[in-house]
């Protein structure tokens, strides 16, 4: 029996619903003393004595008692299913709090149980914000990822014990495991982006049209925070999805030589954003002749996608325009679809086929990397073995 403090978390989404579920975790016997007057099971047993994984009908409350169903999932876990209205949920939560239970979010309740693959999958799913990413995360959480981790761990554990000198069999086991680790890790960047949008930062001279292009890509007018002449604007952002992939767009204030402290801070922030972005877009204004600022940006960010903006204006770049620059006009919409296509191509060059196991949390990636980088055989076995622990126990 655990001595953990009691916590209560609402598992169902906020708002009215037919049924709401509250999960209580901790030492359930603490509840019996105080809950007895509050909960009366039809079978007459106290909460902590309900049969495991069976549902029990009962009433909650003194007067105008409400019908609820409880289910004890383990020694420390109890679920209460009540009417879905906010008031019914709040009433039970209040009673539980009076009984010494702390109300917490379901995520923190799960996290308090220690790391587990299940908890991470559920947490990731709850943070997916497109159908496409949710579909992939659902596949992982429906056993694909668990199978991949178990497979990896078993492969090593079932192999023969460590011989004094490396045998060809051991080398073979290690080679196969390394290739499995590499196959999983190949998707780590993609997997982490399923819950964290790909970031695209637009840069270019002041007035090149960064804000206008972001608004076009977002499909709505995003408010500009600071737009006074001579003042470096804050970096502002907008989130959208291209082809079902979540993307965070940010523009930067013009990158000029800093003269003022404020300007310097803004420029440093812009550079930091650019360096940390998944993709940089350098805009040039086709209606203005090339300048040293444009050239500096090309040489500073050679891997950037170059947009020849304001292509509705007479072209003053002519043969100086970078060969791969994409002609775009935020005013007429020309080139916008092609720009979206190129952004997706650069951000998500490969899409995993269905059935591919993908690590989806930083911790998963770390565990896999540790196994891959293990210095010697003992280290290697220890880290692969830790995958077993990593799988953890589901609530
Ligand atoms: P930023 O300083 O880089 O964010 O530039 P803005 O988005 O504020 O745009 C600067 C000016 O360029 C504004 O007057 C816009 O109306 C104009 N502009 C933006 N995009 C286009 C375009 O595609 N074509 C033309 N002709 N003008 C544009």
Image: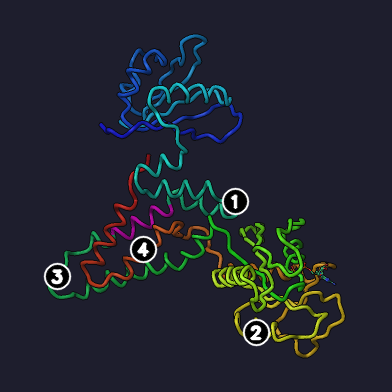
Q: Residue furthest bottom?
A: 319
Above or below, 98 against 331 in this view is above
Provide the residue designation for mark 4. Answer: 368
Q: Earlier in the sequence, mark 2 or mark 3?
A: 3
Q: Residue 394, image x and y in percent?
A: 37, 42
Q: Residue 299, image x and y in percent?
A: 62, 85
Magenta part of the protein: which range?
Answer: 144-154
Above or below, 307 against 181 in this view is below
Instruction: Please state, as top left, top right, bottom left or bottom right, where the C terminus lies in the image.
Output: top left
Mark 1 vs mark 2, foreground winner is 2
Q: Earlier in the sequence, mark 4 or mark 3?
A: 3
Mark 1 vs mark 3, foreground winner is 1
Q: Residue 44, image x and y in percent?
A: 35, 12
The answer to whether mark 1 and mark 2 are in CB contact below 8 A is no
Instruction: Please state, as top left, top right, bottom left or bottom right, where the N terminus lies in the image.
Output: top left
Q: Earlier in the sequence, mark 1 or mark 2?
A: 1
Provide the residue designation for mark 3. Answer: 163
Mark 4 vs mark 3, foreground winner is 4
Provide the residue designation for mark 1. Answer: 129
Q: Secondary structure at mark 1?
A: loop
The residues bearing labels 1 and 4 have C-alpha atoms spaced at a distance of 26 Å
| Other-residue count near label 2 (Cα within 10 Å), few / some / many at <14 / 14–19 / ≥20 | few
The residues bearing labels 4 and 3 have C-alpha atoms spaced at a distance of 24 Å
Q: Secondary structure at mark 4?
A: helix
Q: Is residue 326 left or right of residue 245?
A: right
Q: Is residue 254 magenta?
A: no
Q: Is residue 78 left or right of residue 290?
A: left
The answer to whether mark 2 and mark 3 are in CB contact below 8 A is no
């Amino acid at each position: 029996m655990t001595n953990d403090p009691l916590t209560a978390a609402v598992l169902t989404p906020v708002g009215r619903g037919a049924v709401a579920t509250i999960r209580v975790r901790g030492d359930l016997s603490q509840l019996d003393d105080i809950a007895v007057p509050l909960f009366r099971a039809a079978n007459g047993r106290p909460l902590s004595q309900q049969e495991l994984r069976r549902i029990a009908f009962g009433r909650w409350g003194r007067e105008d008692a409400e019908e609820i169903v409880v289910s004890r999932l383990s020694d420390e876990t109890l679920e209460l299913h009540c009417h879905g209205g906010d008031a019914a949920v709040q009433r039970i939560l209040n009673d539980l709090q009076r009984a010494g239970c702390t109300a917490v979010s379901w995520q923190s309740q799960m996290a308090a149980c220690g790391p587990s693959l299940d908890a991470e999958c559920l947490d990731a799913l709850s943070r997916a914000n497109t159908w496409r990413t949710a579909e992939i995360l659902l596949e992982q959480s429906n056993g694909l990822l668990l199978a991949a981790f178990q497979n990896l761990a078993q492969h090593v554990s079932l192999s023969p014990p460590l011989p004094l000198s490396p045998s060809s069999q051991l080398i073979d086991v290690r080679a196969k495991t390394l290739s499995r680790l590499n196959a999983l890790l190949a998707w780590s960047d993609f997997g982490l982006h399923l819950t964290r949008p790909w970031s695209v930062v637009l840069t270019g001279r002041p007035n090149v049209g960064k804000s206008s292009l972001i608004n076009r890509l977002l499909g709505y007018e995003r408010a500009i925070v600071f737009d006074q002449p001579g003042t470096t604007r804050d970096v502002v952002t907008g989130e959208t999805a291209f082809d079902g992939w979540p993307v965070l767009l940010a523009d930067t204030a013009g990158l000029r030589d800093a003269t003022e402290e404020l300007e310097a801070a803004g420029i440093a922030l812009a550079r930091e954003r650019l360096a940390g972005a998944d993709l940089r877009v350098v805009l040039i204004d086709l209606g203005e002749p090339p300048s040293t600022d444009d050239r500096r940006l090309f040489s500073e960010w050679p891997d950037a996608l170059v947009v020849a903006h304001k292509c509705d204006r007479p072209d003053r770049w002519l043969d100086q325009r970078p060969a791969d620059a994409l002609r775009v006009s935020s005013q007429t919409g020309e080139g916008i679809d092609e720009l979206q296509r190129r952004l997706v191509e650069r951000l998500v060059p490969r899409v995993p086929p269905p059935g591919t196991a993908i690590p989806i949390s930083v911790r998963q990636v770390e565990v896999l990397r540790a196994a891959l980088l293990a210095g010697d055989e003992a280290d290697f076995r220890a880290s692969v073995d830790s995958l077993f622990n990593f799988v953890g126990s589901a609530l």
